[in-house]
Image (cartoon, rainbow, N blue to C red):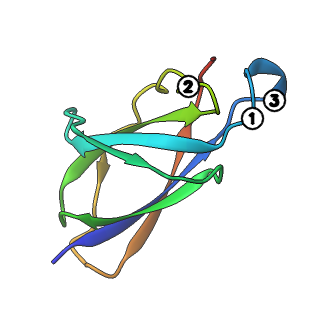
Amino acid sequence: MSTNLTLIWTQIDVSQRNGIITSYIIDYGEGISREMKINTKSSATTYLLTGLKPFTEYTFTVAGVNSVNRGPFSGSSEIIRTSEESNLIKYHPLLLYFVF
């Protein structure tokens, strides 16, 4: 059994970034350990993570990617606990700050 989680974040203002964001890297893991990375392959500021363990605590960071490189990762999210129900989707906003 696995659970899903939709992450939502706010990108940095256009005037404060260096280039057009083409995708995001989400770095996440159980507790404070973040050993998994996903490239969203999209400039959208939401992403549905699937296959997470039920009733498990995760933390997340996000970094923007442009045609040249990846910016630094945002600060860590609060600890987010997934639901015990596999079909429940939770929405969690993240605040994203990065500079290229």
Q: Which mark is residue 20?
A: 1
Q: CA distance from mark 3 to mark 2?
A: 17 Å
Circle 1 packing at 10 Å, graded few (<14), some (14-19), many (20+), is: few
Q: Position of residue 95 (x, y in %)?
A: 57, 35
The amino acid sitting under disc 3 is Val
Query: Element under label 3?
Result: helix
Q: Which mark is residue 32?
A: none
Mark 3 = which residue?
Answer: 14
For marks 1 and 3, the one nearer the N-term is: 3
Residue 74 or residue 81, whichever sits in front = 74
Circles 1, 3 touching at the beta carbon (< 8 Å): no
For the N terminus, the quadrant is: bottom left
For marks 3 and 2, the one nearer the N-term is: 3
Asked if 19 appears above or below 30 in the picture, the reply is: above
Q: CA distance from mark 2 to mark 1?
A: 11 Å
Q: Which mark is residue 69?
A: 2
Mark 1 vs mark 3, foreground winner is 1
Query: Element under label 2?
Result: loop
Q: Position of residue 10 (x, y in %)?
A: 65, 41
Q: Position of residue 11 (x, y in %)?
A: 67, 37
Query: Element under label 1?
Result: loop
